[in-house]
Image: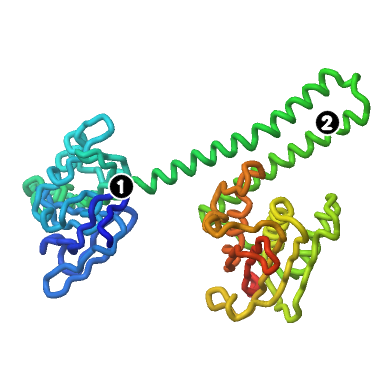
């Protein structure tokens, strides 16, 4: 460490987490939000829980801190050893956005005995540090007999609190998610406004003054409406793909696919749409393996990369299809195919390379929603492949992706 503080976090306390000998019984577990983390015991001393990415604080029935790991120390600025044995209510003086003390309003030790947890909430320390806090209860078993242990006593029946488990996270991650969501809404609104305005304008004009236009004028207006409708459909499709990629729900339906044939199909489509045949060059190396891929997604990948080269590049767009080389093999897979899409334009500046595959990245102010290359990366990785961008041998940009040959779904 260079001594600098991580934004949104306190100075890192390098001392290991402190666990009281009675934090858990030997061989027990630390209960955390969404799961159970095993904690081993050897010679009566607890193993450190510093490997947990989130802050972990465990207090006993009286509020005395039993566990305080390094992440909790980093987030709160309290050394682990100073936290051991302290009152958790004084150690973590949490309050909400209105300044109300969370401990006084939630009353975790004296509230309803049926509560099991508090979902993640945004709370603040006295100095204004925002933390995302999840609280879980470990309660004693309920008793039906007349003999009841004292409230809050260790091992007590009646559902009284034995342990209070508090998970802490920094608010930076949530802030990034909120910024991304705001960018998404802004981008979608901007991209939808232009085509929908055009569709509305032309349709309203045609309905109001149909008889005043010639057939050629009507055709131009209707073709514009059709193109703008395609643009809206494409944007909605991209948004659905982004949603599937982010949630891990992208499905790959494998079938026997000839990658060179898919390249020829994409190029033929571009030529039919008006591009010059001389603009494209397809190079296929011998010895290509049999590949089982999702044909529709391969078309989407190739179509996005070729369109990107045509729109932002210059000169001839060259597509090279070749077997995987020794340095291309992803994740130790043997056979596969590598595809390079090259142009002869200015290329991508080295400082921009890390941003190319991010959401909403655009080389120019105008030119789509900036989701195409992000989707391409997600589709390639869904096949188990990789994609990179570098300078082409003859100048310009080269997008190169690899895909393992794989096996059919029924194999």
Seen as rendered, the residue at the extreme right is: 215
The residue tagged with tag 2: helix, strand or loop? Answer: helix
Position of residue 32 measured from the top left corner of the image (x, y, whole percent): 28, 55
Can you say whether 222 is above or below 390 in the image? above
Dot 2 crowding, Cα within 10 Å, few <14, some 14–19, many 20+ = some
Position of residue 155 measured from the top left corner of the image (x, y, whole percent): 12, 55
Residue 140 appearing in the image: no
Can you say whether 213 is above or below 337 in the image? above
Mark number displayed over residue 8:
1
Which comes sooner in the sequence, label 1 or label 2?
1
The answer to whether residue 288 is left or right of residue 407 is right
Mark number displayed over residue 221:
2
The residue tagged with tag 1: helix, strand or loop? Answer: loop
Q: Nearer the viewer, mark 1 or mark 2?
A: 1
The answer to whether residue 22 is left or right of residue 331 is left
Distance between mark 1 and mark 2 Cα atoms: 54 Å
Relative depth, front residue between 62 and 242: 242
Position of residue 48 measured from the top left corner of the image (x, y, whole percent): 21, 66
Position of residue 186 measured from the top left corner of the image (x, y, whole percent): 55, 36
For the point 72% across and 57% down, which residue is it?
306
Picture quarter containing residue 209?
Answer: top right
Picture quarter containing residue 307?
Answer: bottom right
Dot 1 crowding, Cα within 10 Å, few <14, some 14–19, many 20+ = few
For the point 80% across and 22% down, which residue is it?
205
Relative depth, front residue between 350 and 131: 350
Q: How is the image coloured?
A: rainbow
For the point 30% across and 50% down, which residue is it?
169
């Amino acid at each position: 460490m260079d001594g600098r503080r991580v934004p949104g976090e306190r100075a890192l306390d390098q001392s290991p987490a402190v666990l009281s000998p009675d934090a858990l019984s030997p061989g027990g577990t630390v209960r955390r939000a969404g799961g159970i983390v095993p904690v081993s015991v050897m010679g009566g001393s607890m193993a450190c829980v510093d490997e947990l990415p989130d802050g972990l604080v465990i207090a006993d029935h009286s509020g005395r801190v039993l566990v305080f790991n390094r992440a909790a120390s980093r987030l709160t600025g309290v050394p682990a050893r100073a936290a051991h044995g302290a009152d958790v209510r004084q150690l973590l003086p949490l309050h909400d956005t209105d300044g109300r003390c969370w401990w006084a309003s939630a009353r975790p030790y004296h509230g309803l005995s049926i509560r099991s947890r508090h979902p993640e909430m945004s709370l603040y320390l006295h100095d204004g540090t925002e933390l995302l806090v999840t609280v879980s209860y470990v309660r004693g078993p309920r008793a039906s007999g007349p003999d009841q242990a004292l409230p809050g006593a260790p091992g007590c029946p009646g559902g009284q609190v034995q342990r209070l488990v508090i998970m802490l996270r920094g608010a930076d991650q949530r802030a990034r998610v909120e910024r991304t969501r705001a960018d998404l809404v802004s981008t979608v609104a901007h991209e939808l406004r232009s085509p929908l305005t055009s569709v509305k304008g032309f349709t309203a004009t045609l309905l109001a003054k149909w008889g005043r236009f010639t057939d050629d004028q009507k055709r131009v207006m209707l073709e514009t409406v059709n193109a703008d409708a395609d643009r809206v459909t494409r944007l909605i499709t991209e948004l659905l793909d982004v949603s599937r990629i982010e949630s891990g729900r992208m499905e790959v339906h494998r079938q026997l696919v000839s990658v060179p044939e898919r390249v020829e199909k994409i190029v033929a489509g571009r030529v039919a749409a008006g591009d010059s045949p001389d603009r494209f060059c397809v190079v296929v190396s011998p010895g290509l393996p049999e590949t089982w891929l999702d044909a529709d997604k391969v078309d989407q990948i190739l179509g996005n990369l070729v369109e990107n080269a045509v729109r932002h590049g210059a000169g001839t767009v060259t597509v090279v299809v070749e077997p995987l080389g020794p340095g291309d093999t992803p994740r130790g897979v043997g056979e596969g195919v590598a595809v390079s899409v090259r142009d002869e334009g200015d290329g991508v500046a080295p400082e921009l390379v890390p941003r190319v595959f991010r959401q909403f990245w655009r080389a120019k102010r105008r030119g789509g929603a900036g989701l195409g290359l992000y989707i391409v990366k997600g589709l390639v990785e869904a096949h188990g492949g990789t994609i990179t961008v570098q300078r082409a041998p003859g100048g310009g940009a080269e997008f190169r992706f690899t895909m393992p040959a794989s096996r059919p779904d029924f194999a």
